[in-house]
Image (cartoon, rainbow, N blue to C red):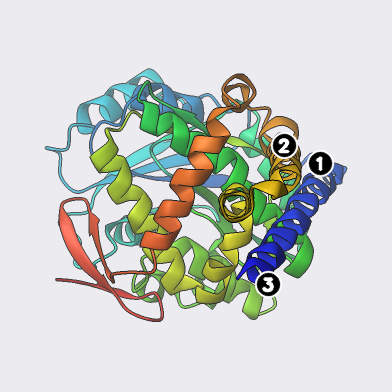
Amino acid sequence: MLIAISALLLGSWVYCVLTVVAGRRYLAQRLPDTEAREPISILKPLSGLDEGLEENLRSFFTQDYPAFEILFAMRTENDPAHGLVRRLQGEYSHIPSQLILTGEPPWPNAKSWSLHQMQQQARHSLLVMSDSDIRVDSHMLRTLAREFSDPSLAVTTCPYRAVPGPSFWSKLEAIGMNTEFLGGILVARILDGMKFAVGPTIAARKSAIEAVGGWPYLQEFLAEDFVLGNEAAAKGLGVALSSYVIEHRIGAQAFGKNARHRLRWCRSTRRSRPAGYIGQLFTNPLPIALALFAAVPATWPALLATFVLRMFAAHATAGLVLADPLTRREWPLIIAQDLLSFAFWIAGFFGNTIDWRGETYFLQKDGRFTKL
């Protein structure tokens, strides 16, 4: 048993080093030397009034870009966000925009239904699909357009800096996103290339979405974002990790809501990419080192080395890539977050149901899901 734990710890050390290398390689990428002006359609699915929603939406209206439109989708005009969108449309009347009322979604994946409806109305072939809790600066579209001046690029994912609300659990989750989660993306990028996408903000050409089967196919999966990137890469289309970092405003959550969200995420990941989910063990080196120390206290130097390596890896992602002030200020919370993340990782192996927006769904082995 001690040999097995030691081997796992050595693997986690290698992973920490790879995270540092991957972070530096990401920062070394360069934008195409061109000033692209391709028109862009921004797709915004909405449901309710998220914390900070007005500032989030306003950041998209104020893009420093010559040709773009914004499409919003919500189920009915009774949605609490309806009045806000109408007010912003009036304030920014010079920006082409439209609000689509989708009705009750006939698909289990309501977000895919909204994106499907908006894509049908979008005038431009380059789409930026962004969640309601995303905030950007005025240069986002300009950066993405320069990246898509490469004709081989079909899908790109924007890395995100999670910004929590005042709740302690939200703060822990943000630190996890900015260190552990991003580290996994960066390491996967250098080991196997970008063969997936992640959800908060994805840019894609309509042709790429249609090539993988369109939203009628993608809606069958809970992790439709991952499947979009994975299927596009399998078809030989260019998939990349954007150089533009967005802000993911995750808001304040009590422990119960935060726990359900984390468990949904773990179970979804396990079903979408089971081998990768098992490999996530190496992204949590501190629990492994603590287990070894508990068994053999004389291994405390290994525990200290693990802590140092974990801090270097966290700095590579949260510090260098994301410029995240939260992790720099609250770095001791990385320990608590890693232990909590490990507990949810274990829990993710059990159960095949998730709670999402008040409904219960069953996750199938291939990542598809059905409403119970």
Q: Quadrant of the N terminus?
A: bottom right
| Horizontal arrangement in the rendering, residue 182 relative to residue 25 (left or right) | left
Q: Residues within 10 Å of mark 1 (few under 14, many from 20)?
A: few
Three-letter amino acid code at the position of disc 3:
Leu
Name the one closer to the observer, 363 or 64: 363
Q: Quadrant of the C terminus?
A: bottom left
Asked if marks 1 and 3 touch (Cβ < 8 Å), the reply is no
Relative height, residue 262 to residue 85 (above, below): below
Whether residue 122 appears in this view of the structure is: no
The residue sitting at 29% across, 63% down in the picture is 109
Q: Which residue is mark 1?
A: 27
Instruction: Give percent across and percent down for residue 264.
Output: 33, 57
What kind of element bears circle 2?
A: helix
Task: Name the disc covering residue 321, or none.
Answer: 2
Q: Which badge, 2 or 3, is on the more N-terminal residue?
A: 3
Asked if marks 2 and 1 touch (Cβ < 8 Å), the reply is yes
Q: Quadrant of residue 196?
A: bottom right
Relative height, residue 241 to residue 66 (above, below): below
Three-letter amino acid code at the position of disc 1:
Leu
Q: Which residue is mark 3?
A: 237
**Which of the two marks, 2 or 3, is nearer to us in this view?**
2
Q: Which badge, 2 or 1, is on the more N-terminal residue?
A: 1
Q: Separation of disc 2 and disc 1 at Cα? A: 7 Å
